Image (cartoon, coloured by chain):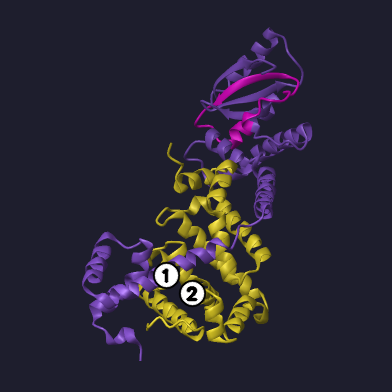
Chain colours: A purple, B yellow
């Protein structure tokens, strides 16, 4: 019924490859097979000319289809801009990631599940911090850890690195005992910026507060006074 | 100076580079549009909407591109999926208006048609009268220069089926030509 079935398998195979040979998309090996067959088979060569006609007219037809209007590109980039805006709102303040990083930094690697409850206190700290950033900085949300572009809260500050053996509960108690709040971090080296007093302190007063905090060896690895403005 | 490869552009797109997206779009959108336009029977508005969707998918999925195939093959595969999905949502009677017109035109009077049009024009008319399935494979092989493997990847069929489908598409084309008064002596 169909001519392709009546031919020898090799020729049949070669004939099915003719369109790809005309388009130049055959492997080198197959292209050589086709070339050899075309050189010795006049009927196959005639059919190859038909393929070449089809190729030429298919290209001609497609090239006359024109191009899309600028609307397609405008629609695409409007959608991309809309997605990017949504993405920024979702991720600029990556609270979950920030909190996870914080807990990882401040807790020993052996932090037990029993410490999870204590972690709630850290969540509260972080929540206050997030609230601060959202309310103080309006719609321009920034990653708390690395925002150095806007005004810092009033008060006295210190830079602290927590003891790797301290767990979240220890740190929470530390904050409560010293009426301190977490401002930002971790910065390089696992250092956090904390507020140690709600108002600015003199250099000596701040040094005294920092010295008291440094006594809590179970929580504090090191602590130094920080400038009020960054 | 060598142009940035499609693969490099897609890597940059995965990182949110909007300019890379513009370059990739400029490089491929016309061919993708023409491929889609043929699939949707010449509906230019629908084709434009679809290519926006295709490239938006690229923006969203760029990180998943594994460069096992050419970027153009990936784009055409996405485009094909979008076009067929859109066609499934449309009533059947709207699908192939252009094809129907072409067939109608061809059935007028083969001899007269052959006299008044050159062979190339008749061949192009017959190409538009093929079924979407045959039209698609002919376009992919001849116009989009896709290998057997690439067509198999885009259409989602085995390589052997690609070859036989192309054969039958060409056979059908010859039959349409014969009906239009052009006997090529094959098959």
- From the viewer's side, name the closer residue of B19 and B102: B102
Above or below: residue A213 compared with residue A168:
above
Circle 2/circle 1 CB separation < 8 Å: yes
Q: Residue at x 44, y 78 (%)?
A: B169
Q: Quadrant of residue A195?
A: top right
Q: Which mark is residue A53?
A: 1
Q: Residue at x 65, y 64 (%)?
A: B44
Q: Secondary structure at mark 1?
A: helix
* Location of residue A56 with respect to A92 vertically, above or below: below
The reply to whether residue B124 is in sight is yes
Q: Is residue B162 above or below residue A74?
A: below
Q: Where B106 sits versus B120, above or below? A: below
| Residue positioned 39% across, 56% down in the render | B68
**Residue B154 seen from this side:** no
C-alpha gap between disc 2 and disc 1: 10 Å
Left or right side of A42 for A66:
right
Element marked by disc 2: helix
Position of residue A198 measured from the top left corner of the image (x, y, whole percent): 76, 21
Residue B168 within the magenta-colored segment of the rendering? no
User: Relative to the observer, which residue lies in front, B69 or A210?
Assistant: B69
Q: Which residue is mark 2?
A: B119
Q: Which residues are magenta?
A: A145-172
The numbered mark 2 sits on a residue in which chain? B
Which of B173/B106 is in front?
Answer: B106
């Amino acid at each position: 019924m169909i001519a392709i079935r009546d031919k020898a398998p090799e020729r049949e195979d070669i004939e099915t490859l003719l369109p790809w040979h005309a388009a130049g998309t055959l492997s080198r090996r197959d292209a050589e097979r086709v070339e050899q067959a075309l050189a010795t088979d006049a009927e196959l060569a005639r059919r190859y000319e038909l393929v070449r006609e089809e190729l030429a007219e298919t290209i001609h037809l497609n090239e006359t289809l024109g191009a899309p209007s600028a609307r397609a590109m405008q629609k695409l980039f409007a959608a991309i801009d809309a997605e990017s805006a949504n993405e920024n709102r979702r991720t600029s303040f990556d609270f979950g990631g920030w909190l996870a990083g914080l807990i990882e930094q401040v807790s020993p690697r052996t932090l037990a599940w029993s410490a999870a409850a204590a972690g709630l206190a850290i969540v509260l700290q972080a929540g206050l911090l997030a609230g601060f950033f959202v309310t103080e900085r309006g719609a321009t949300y920034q990653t708390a850890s690395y925002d150095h572009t806007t005004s810092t809260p009033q008060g006295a500050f210190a830079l602290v690195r927590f003891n790797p053996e301290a767990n979240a509960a220890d740190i929470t108690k530390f904050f409560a005992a010293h009426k301190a709040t977490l401002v930002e971090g971790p910065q390089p080296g696992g250092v956090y910026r904390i507020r140690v007093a709600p108002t600015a302190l003199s250099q000596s007063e701040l040094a005294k507060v920092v010295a008291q905090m440094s006594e809590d060896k179970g929580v504090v690895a090191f602590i130094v006074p920080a400038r009020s403005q960054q | 100076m060598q142009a940035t490869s499609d693969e490099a552009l897609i890597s940059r797109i995965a990182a949110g580079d909007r300019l890379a997206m513009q370059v990739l779009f400029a490089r491929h959108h016309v061919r993708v549009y023409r491929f889609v336009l043929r699939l949707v029977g010449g509906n230019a508005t629908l084709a434009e909407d679809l290519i926006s969707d295709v490239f938006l998918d690229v923006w969203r999925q760029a990180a998943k591109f594994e460069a096992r195939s050419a970027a153009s093959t990936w784009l055409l595969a996405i485009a094909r999926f979008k076009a067929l999905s859109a066609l499934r949502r449309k009533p059947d009677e709207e699908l192939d208006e252009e094809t129907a017109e072409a067939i109608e035109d061809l059935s007028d009077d083969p001899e007269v048609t052959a006299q008044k049009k050159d062979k190339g024009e008749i061949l192009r008319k017959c190409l538009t009268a093929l079924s979407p399935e045959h039209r698609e494979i002919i376009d992919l092989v001849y116009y989009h220069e896709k290998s057997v493997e690439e067509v198999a990847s885009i259409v989602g069929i085995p390589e052997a089926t690609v070859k036989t489908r192309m054969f039958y598409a060409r056979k059908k084309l010859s039959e349409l030509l014969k009906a239009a008064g052009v006997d090529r002596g094959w098959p």
